[in-house]
Image (cartoon, rainbow, N blue to C red):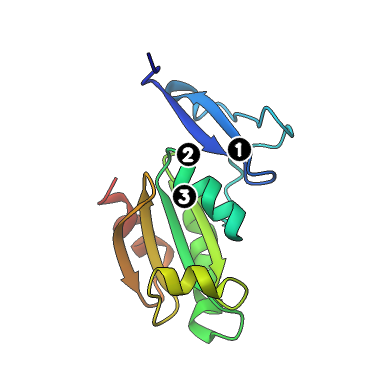
Amino acid sequence: MTDISAVIIACPRCNGLNRVPQARLGDAPKCGKCGAALFDAHPVALDAAGFHAHVERADLPVLVDFWAPWCGPCRMMAPQFEAAAAQLEPQMRLAKLDTEAQPQLAGRFGIRSIPTLVLFKQGREIARQAGAMGMHDIVRWARQFV
């Protein structure tokens, strides 16, 4: 029988999966594999392995910012997205996916414009928003779905 009061969380450093009691999410849990903090109020940079661990295998909702280094609006939104991580963790993970470095993932989700925010829950897309947003708008938008 599975303990429904525990959640699986991927480590932002090593992508190791950790089972954490839901009631202890706010107690600065650490990775059992590498010892890193599971939450540090910063978005996680995703590659294919990180996407698999954080989005497809972990239990927390994940808000992914699909972006590119050459994109002006993406660069303008980056500090706002960073600030939103401090507001939304540990209830959800925030992550960034560079569409230039990971074109296959961007293509898999039909990303046509950037920045695009996609909210995933249990590996499935549940919401999408294109265009740059401020920190308060990101937080308000994401919280309505979880």
Residue ID at (47%, 66%): 65
**Identity of the amino acid at label 3?**
Val
**Residue at the outermost right position:** 34
Nearer-the-camera pick, 35 or 139: 35
Disc 1 crowd, CA 10 A, few/some/many (<14, 14-19, 20+): many
Label 2–label 1 contact, CB within 8 A: yes
Label 2–label 3 contact, CB within 8 A: no
Residue 87 point in image, percent of width and height? 45, 48
Give the alpha-carbon distance from disc 3 to disc 1, as whole Å: 15 Å
Residue 33 point in image, percent of width and height? 71, 31
SS for tag 2? Answer: loop
SS for tag 3? Answer: helix
Residue 22, quarter of the rendered image: top left
- What residue sits right under mark 2 in the picture? 90
Nearer-the-camera pick, 121 or 133: 121
Residue ID at (39%, 18%): 2
- What residue sits right under mark 1 in the picture? 38
State whether residue 86 appears in this view: no
Give the alpha-carbon distance from disc 2 to disc 3, as whole Å: 15 Å
- What residue sits right under mark 3 in the picture? 55
The relative height of residue 26 versus residue 115 in the rendered view (above or below) is above
Residue 37 point in image, percent of width and height? 66, 37
**Identity of the amino acid at label 2?**
Pro
Mark 3 or 1 closer to N-term? 1
The N terminus - image quarter: top left
Residue ID at (53%, 86%): 72
Mark 2 or 3 closer to N-term? 3
Disc 2 crowd, CA 10 A, few/some/many (<14, 14-19, 20+): many
Residue 4 point in image, percent of width and height? 36, 21
